[in-house]
Amino acid sequence: MMEKMIFGRYIPGDSALHRLDPRAKLLFVFGFILIVFLANNVVTYSLLVTFVLLLIALSKMNIRFLINGLKPVIILIIFTFFLQLFFNKEGDVIFQIGGINIHEEGLRMAVFISIRFFLLVFVTTLMTLTTTPITLTDGLESLMNPLRRLNFPVHELALMMSISLRFIPTLMDETDKIMKAQMARGVEFSSGPIKDRIKAIVPLLIPLFVSSFKRAEELATAMEARGYQGGEGRTKYRRLVWEGRDTAAIVIFFILTALLIWLRA
């Protein structure tokens, strides 16, 4: 499962999403995180699901590849679904399961919240899959550039976010290696009582934390050896160019927002 994790990875390609300016992608994703909460009925959620499926098609990514890579997140979403289903007691009772009442509002909220999580996960994952961490950093820094007048550390914040995204797959690979090493020594992660499984995680976390701190120290040393002094006076190797397709993406976002506001009633 760790080897198939795709969050934070970049998949090279030449799709319509790959060619978009990173600033357009960031604006779209930040806006989508807000407008997804405008959906409140079957029609609006159907519109959002259709739109996200269209984005997946434009990215030329296989939906099975996305689902397999997001299995840990999907498990969390399924857990949230059943949490809402069994513990939300609003509305009329629809049916019973082993003495547990399933209420109308509980089922509605379970479905809607799960779909909302799915949409947010897929959209943010598509952004990272179609944009390199360096390009994302440049786009984020460009968007936050006006904050420099307030002495806000724009470059440093963008750099931290870029490093965080870059190290997600690295840490996943490291976790997988440590798990295989522990399993070779007889540790069981997927069988036995819950108590034993939790105990088995401790030998996994300690070397993972040690490895993470070691990598961070090596990265800091490498940056200092190369004379890194922050964002002051730095030039850009790649220039971001805003084109017509980026404007079209923002226009589509506003059209989607208007449709959601119109259909939510």
Image (spheres, helix red, strand yellow):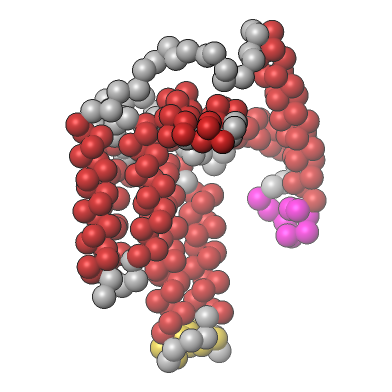
Q: Residue at x 27, y 57 (%)?
A: 257
Query: Looking at the picture, how far across and down is residue 11, in whole percent?
Result: 39, 28
Query: Looking at the picture, how far across and down is residue 255, in whole percent?
Result: 21, 53
Locate the N terminus by quadrant: top right
Q: Residue at x 27, y 49 (%)?
A: 253
Picture quadrant of residue 247: top left
Q: Residue at x 74, y 22 (%)?
A: 217
Whether residue 56 appears in magenta in the rendering, the answer is no
Locate the C terminus by quadrant: bottom left
Q: Quick check: 13 left or right of 91?
A: left
Whether residue 195 appears in magenta in the rendering, the answer is yes
Q: Is residue 65 visible?
A: no
User: Most extreme residue toward the bottom, as rendered?
Assistant: 92
Name the residue nearer the viewer: 89 or 264. 264
Q: Quick check: 45 left or right of 101?
A: left
Picture quadrant of residue 65: top left
Query: Looking at the picture, how far across and down is residue 15, in whole percent?
Result: 26, 30
Picture quadrant of residue 114: bottom left
Q: Residue at x 46, y 42 (%)?
A: 69
Query: Looking at the picture, how far across and down is residue 12, in whole percent?
Result: 36, 24
Range shown magenta: 190-198
